[in-house]
Image: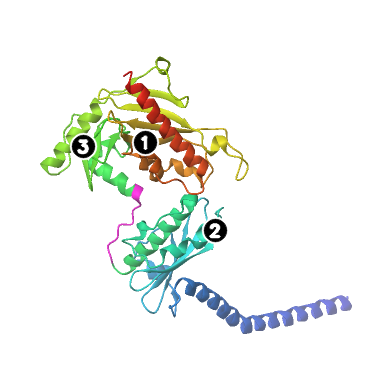
Amino acid sequence: MKKAIHCVATLTVICLVVSVLLAFANYITAPIIRQKQDEAANAALLVVMPEGKDFVLLTEDDLASYTLPATVTKVYREAGGGYVFELTTSGYASGLVLLCGVGADGAVTGATVLSSQETLGAENSYGDRLVGRRAEDIEQVDTVTSATKTTAAYRNAVRDALLAFAVLGGADVDLRSEAEILAESLNTALPSGEGAFEKWFVIEALTGVDDVYVAENGTGYVCVIGDEYVGVKADGTVTSQTDTETAQTAAAAVATVKGAVLTELSLGSYEGLPASVQAAAVTESGSVVLTVRGAGYGILGGSSYHPASGEYIIVRVAISAEGTILDCVTLSQAESENIGDACADEAFYGQFDGKTAQNYAEVDGISGATYTTDGYKKAIGDAFAAFNVLKGGV
């Protein structure tokens, strides 16, 4: 019994001694570890702000009186008046974490990736393109077309850093996204639309109007004329406060939209139509609306990236009686993710608006997606060929 008690006492003493030694070691090494961590953090900060010094991580209390973009997760203030922002966003995948420096003059001093789940690596060098940019010109930096989602997310995050810098400087900044601005503008112009609008596919030429949105509940329309959003009720009454000329332009556009009628054509009644044409219709003014399939990478691709999906790109295109594209949109596609699927972005297919049979091929292609680009342009060429056939029989 005495022996057992002696063993327990010995173990207790040993544990106490070890605990004391560990506490002492932690007391000695903790400051050193913190110093090393601070040095590593400062080294990362200096990557995006090489001339920076004395960085201070701002606390939640420091930032409590500011409303910053949701992408901003950390803010470091630099002694010279600049800031470094850590931002988290989603590109092709979630978890794209960036570090962006903004100097006291409001220009980007550097941007780099801290963490990424992206597939192509375009984000690793994209930050170099953004150095020196300010809030007013950041949108002018082109995305990488072979990695549109990744680089667009990167650029937007850096834009958020610039907006956050302005907010911290006391500026009144609109932090809404483009989609939020559009939604709010449409709802303000026509509140009866209850926030649900669909962009009208242009099948008749509109004069002086950039776009028309139709309220899904049938209560009216919103015409985009330059920077103005003009609401027009279903009965043609202009509801927005604007000048007489703009109101008349909007009312005339709505009248055109309401009066546009499509008559479906029987493809079997025409000889010489390209086999890619799936449907065709004509308006009273002679505009032709075609649904055409394009054989892009989804049909012709091999195994260099992934096997072909066996699906076509489906394109809808409207051509005026004079032979000019009024509107173009990708209805469906199954191209390579983050590469050829850029054909579904308006930034690509919107380039065909206003083009003719003589110049549509001049549209910029999708970088790294030759099959997709060639297939899409061939579909547009087939649409013009079909237009010429139908024009002779309409």
Residue 96 against residue 308 in the figure, above or below: below
Region of the chain picked out in magenta, as a range:
171-179
Q: Of the residues under marks 3 and 1, which one precedes in the sequence?
A: 3
| Magenta stretch, main secondary structure class | loop
Label 2 SS: loop
The label shown at residue 116 is: 2
Contact check, label 1 and label 2, Cβ < 8 Å = no
Crowd band around label 2 with a 10 angstrom C-alpha radius: few (<14), some (14–19), many (20+): many
Label 3 SS: loop
Q: On the rendered image, what quadrant is the N terminus found in? A: bottom right
Disc 2 marks a residue whose amino acid type is Ser
Disc 1 marks a residue whose amino acid type is Cys
* Residue 151 horizontal/vertical position (percent): 46, 55
The residue that label 1 is drawn on is 328
Quadrant housing residue 346: top left
Q: Is residue 218 left or right of residue 10?
A: left
Disc 2 to disc 3, C-alpha distance: 46 Å
Rendered residue at 44%/45% (across/down): 365
The residue that label 3 is drawn on is 207
Q: On the rendered image, what quadrant is the C terminus found in? A: top left
